[in-house]
Image (spheres, grey):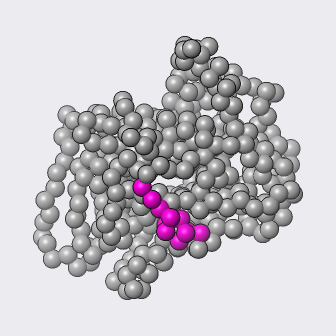
Amino acid sequence: MEPGPLNAITDVAGLRVGHTTLIEGEGPLRPGRGPVRTGVTIIVPHDGDIWTEPMFAGAHRLNGNGELTGLEWIRESGMLAGAIGITNTHSVGVVHDAIIEAAVRAHAMSDAVWALPVAGETYDGALNDINGFHVRPEHVHAALASARDGPVGEGNVGGGTGMICHEFKGGIGTSSRSAGEWTVGVLVQANYGTRELLRIDGVPVGAAISRDEVPSPWDQVDALSARAGAEGGSIIGIVATDAPLLPHQCTRLAQRVGMGVARMGSYASHGSGDLFCAFATGNRDLSRNAAEDDPRPTVALRMVTDQQINPLLEAVAEATEEAIVNALVAAETMVGRDGITAHAIDHDRLREIMREHGRLFG
C-alpha cells in the first residue's frame, strides 16, 4: 500500500500533533533533580472544538500491563472527545489532569464542560529520573499549543524522549497509508521488545546485531540493580482515519495495531502494556455540547460496508509496522541517568542486513 504525502498520522486532514521534549542534566541519578529524559506528546483529533465535538472511536488491549485512560467511556459510548496525551508511566496523571484543565479553560471554566481524556504511558525510567515527576501541566499546555499539521517529529521527542525499543533507542514514530478514497494514519510510542526478536520486513535484524556489537541499555540497568528488563516494555498505538466508521469498526482497526507490532517481533509479553485507540473523522456533528444539551433526537450517519473495510484493516497493520521502524530509524543515541546508553540502530548496518536478505538492491 502507498503512504500518504507526509507518511504521518497528520495525513488525516485536520489532525495535529505537538511535542514537549525535556532533556536536562547528566551523570548519576538524583531523584527530583535528574537527569531528565522525558516529555509529552499531544494528538489533536480534528479541526473543530475537540472538547465538545466527539468522534466515533474504539479501543483494544493486546496486553494490559499499562495505562491508557478514558477507554472505558470509549467502550461504553463509542466516542472520543478531546486531545490524546502520551507520556511516561509516572506522569500520566499529570497529563490527564492538564488535558481536563485545557478543556475547561477553553470554555471559560464552565462547569457544563467535563472530560474523561485519553492519556497513555510507557516506562522511561532506564534513562530518565522518572520519580522526579518532571512533566508538569505547563508542558502539556505547551505541547497542545504547539500542535500542528504537517510533518511530525519522530524518535527522541515528546513522550518518546526516553524510550527504548528492541534494546535500541526508540520513541515516537508515525506512518500512513492510502486505502482507496480514505487515509489511515498511525502514531506509536515504542518502548518494548527484546533485541533478538526484532524483525523488519520479515528480516531478523535483531538477531544479526548482537549485544557484543551494540550493547543493550538493559544490561546496564541490570548491573545497577534497577528495574529490568527489555521484556517489560510497552507500546501505545493511536490510529486515525477519515473513513466514515462506526464505533465497532474503529475497534476492529485498533485490534490491527497488534498485527503490526507482531510483525516487528513482539509477542505481547506479560510485563508489556500494549494499548491501542482508533478514531474516525468521517462522521461529524455526532454530538453537540458533549451531548449534554443536544436537542436532536437523531443524527445522520455514513458507514463503510464490511465488503470495503479490508483495505483499512491492512492499512493499520502496515502503517503500524512502519511507524515502529520510523521510531527506530529517527531515534538518536541517548545517554541517560547513571550513564546508561541506548544506542540508535546504525543505518548503514541496517542497510547491510537488509541487502543480505534481498530487501535492498544496489
* Between 332 and 140, the one nearer to me in the picture: 332
| Residue 147 among those drawn in magenta | yes
Write the residue at 58% across / 73% down. 137
Percent of width and height locating residue 280: 31, 52
In the displayed structure, 38 sits above or below 95; it is: above
Percent of width and height locating residue 174: 49, 44
In the image, is 27 to the left or to the right of 239? Answer: right
The residues colored magenta run: 139-149
Q: Which quarter shows the N terminus?
A: top left
Q: Which quarter shows the C terminus?
A: top right
In the image, is 72 to the left or to the right of 292? Answer: right
Does residue 248 appear in this view? no
Write the residue at 47% across / 62% down. 147
- For the image, the number of numbered tags is 0
Write the residue at 84% across / 49% down. 339
Write the residue at 71% across / 25% down. 209
In the displayed structure, 10 sits above or below 24; it is: above
Percent of width and height locating residue 198: 61, 30
| Residue 302 among those drawn in magenta | no
In the image, is 244 to the left or to the right of 92? Answer: left
Does residue 301 appear in this view? yes
Picture quarter containing residue 158?
Answer: bottom right
**Main secondary structure type of the part rendered in magenta:** helix
Percent of width and height locating residue 98: 52, 73
